[in-house]
Structure formats: structure tokens, C-alpha cells
Amino acid sequence: MQEMYSSSILWMHTLKLSKTPCISSTKSEDSSSRTYKGLLGHLASEAVIQGSGPGRIIILPSSFQGSPRAMQQNYQDAMGIVRKCGKPDLFITFTCNPRWKQIEEQLFPGQTPSDRPDLIARVFKLKLKQLIDDIVRNHKFGRTVTHLFVIEFQKRGLPHCHMLIILVNESKPRDSNSVDRFVSSEIPDADQNPQLHETVKSLMIHGSCGVPNKNSPCMEDGKCTKEFPKECRNETAPNKDGYSRYRRRDNGVIAKVGKYEVDNRRVVAYTPHLLMKYDVHINVEVCATVKSIKYLFKYVYKGHDCANVKLELSVKDGATFVKTLEWDEIKGHLDARYVGAPDAV
């Protein structure tokens, strides 16, 4: 029954999408359009290389939310904001916790959170709105100039948000002390703060990788792509790949996660009061240099993962077959997209 519910949501989403003007229309771009002269030249060159003739060009315009052109336009707009307001100061990743009580309390007997994509989408949206209010209106990090964010969905359906915050000059973290007020990368003492200790242990510890688990998804060429475990240090130091190197003291505080014991070297950076309030994995990074600006904005507006595979039959001897090379962005989007039920909601 629950699978039928998710399927019906996806079917309704597909039906609505098919009626979108830029999707339902198959009109190709005018070859005389000055905007697409470069694309026409590229298509003609590729056609010659592949031994075919140039075909139609069908564009998925930037007015379609989530299209590659829309993402590129958003990136350019974001860089314009940087030129006006300065570099981002904070990079926040806010995830969804399917064990939030607002979700679990609304489940019918026998249901799991994955059975209710409508609940997941609605509760996450409300939590995200509250987080933005805390940052922008309640000034949890100080007064803000502006903020940008984008919502993505994991393959298992859970949403998460990437957010960039630009603060006014008086609120910017300029030294190690101000960075430490914003961000912690240490396990709290279990006796002094037991609730925060348990929350950090359950939500903000990077999973076992490296020598204990060489098959971890984060491992590549024998190294952790997230650079865990981090090095211990007594003071926060700025400017490594655009991020601060946070204080991670070798103070003997250890937490047992599963069958492994971990220390401060495996803690993902967080803000204690936000972590306690939202009870979810919420990574807060201080952007230390302008070097990271383009990477951050491209990361935020990179779009979803996609793949497009095409199979062609070989032509028998003696047969004549003339093929054309077409540029169809609408078909590419529809064929390569990955949509889960919460995303469709």
C-alpha cells in the first residue's frame, strides 16, 4: 500500500511536469539565434567527427527550475552577489532526521518514515524555515547581509540543504576566538554535558574509515576524501583550502560509536546550540579565504547526479543508414533525472 502511495505521488509529479510548457513543447531553437551560434558550431563539428549530419537543437531554458541552464544562471547571480557583498563567511549543511518526533508522531501503526514522503518534505521545510529565521532574523551568528541556499535529495529520498551566509563586517569571524564561538569540533565531556555528548556521538561523528574500514564509501586511493581523521591541535588556525583548521585538543575525551572508539579527530564541525535545537546532522564550516568562493557556489548549484545511456544497433552490411546528431536538452533531462517521492512532493 505504501509503495502505491509513493508511486501515485511520482505519477502526479510526472504528469504535472509533462504539462510544463518548456517540456511539452518540442520546438527547436531558431538556427539564426545569435545566442546559440556557438552551440550550432559545436554540433556541426561533432557531427563531422561522428560521420553524421547536424540535426535539431532543442533547448531546456533557464526558466525551468533545476535545469543545467538554471543552475548556471543561479551561479552567475551568486557571483554577482559576492562582488557586491563580499565572500561567504559560513557554509552550512542541514540534513533531515527521519526520527524527528514531528514525523514519528504522525505515523500510523506499522508505518516507517519512508512510507510518508509528504511528512518528510513538510517537516523538513518547516525546520529549514525555522533555521533560516534563527540565522537571519534572530542573528545566531550575528547580523547577516544575505544568504543563499539550495535543497537536494539523497537517493534514499531524504532532503538536505546547502546554505551560504554572508555576515556584516562587525559579525565576521576574524580570529581563532571568534571561530571557536561559532564552531566546535570536539566531543563534549559526558559528565559536564551528557545530552550534547550523546547528540554529537550519534549525529556528528565521521564513520569509521581508513585502517579500520578500507571499504568505506569515503575512501579513494587508500585515503579518506574528507581527510578524516583530522590532526589534533590546541588552537584554531585559518586558511587551509579555504577552511579554518579547528581546535581539536588531545584531551582524552573518547566516545564509543558502534564497536569503535573515536576521539576529537573524527568530529564533524558543528554549532552546539543549533545541534541541540534541531537534533540533526548540521555541519557548520567557517570559510577562511576567498579561494573557496567559486568552489562553494559551484558545489551549491551543481545540480543532481544524473546519467544518460544510449544503445545503438549496428547497421548490417550493404544497408544505407544516414543518421543525424541532435542536441535535445529536454530529452536528456527527462532520461537522466532521478526523482524520489519526497522530491516530487
Image (cartoon, grey):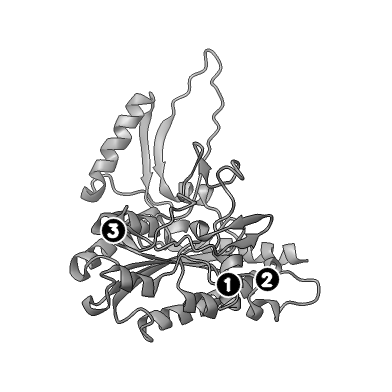
Q: Nearer the viewer, residue 329 or 288?
A: 288
x 70%, y 81%: residue:
105
The amino acid sitting under disc 2 is Arg
Q: Which mark is residue 116?
A: 2
Residue 110 is situated, as x and y percent measured from the top left of the image, at 80, 71
Query: Is 10 placed left or right of 332 in the picture?
Result: right
In space, the residues marked 2 and 1 are separated at their CA atoms by 30 Å
Q: Earlier in the sequence, mark 3 or mark 1?
A: 1
Among all residues in the image, which is located at the extreme right? 110
In the image, residue 302 above or below residue 13: above
x 48%, y 75%: residue:
272
Q: Which mark is residue 172?
A: none
Q: Which residue was labeled with disc 1?
A: 197
**Badge 1: few (under 14), some or many (20 or more) residues near its Cα, within 10 Å?**
some
In space, the residues marked 3 and 2 are separated at their CA atoms by 37 Å
The amino acid sitting under disc 1 is His
Query: Is 249 placed left or right of 158 in the picture?
Result: left
Q: Which residue was labeled with disc 3?
A: 293
Q: Earlier in the sequence, mark 2 or mark 1?
A: 2
Among all residues in the image, which is located at the extreme top? 318
| Residue 242 at least partly seen | no
Q: Nearer the viewer, residue 16 or 292?
A: 292
Query: Is 74 placed left or right of 189 in the picture?
Result: left
x 29%, y 71%: residue:
173
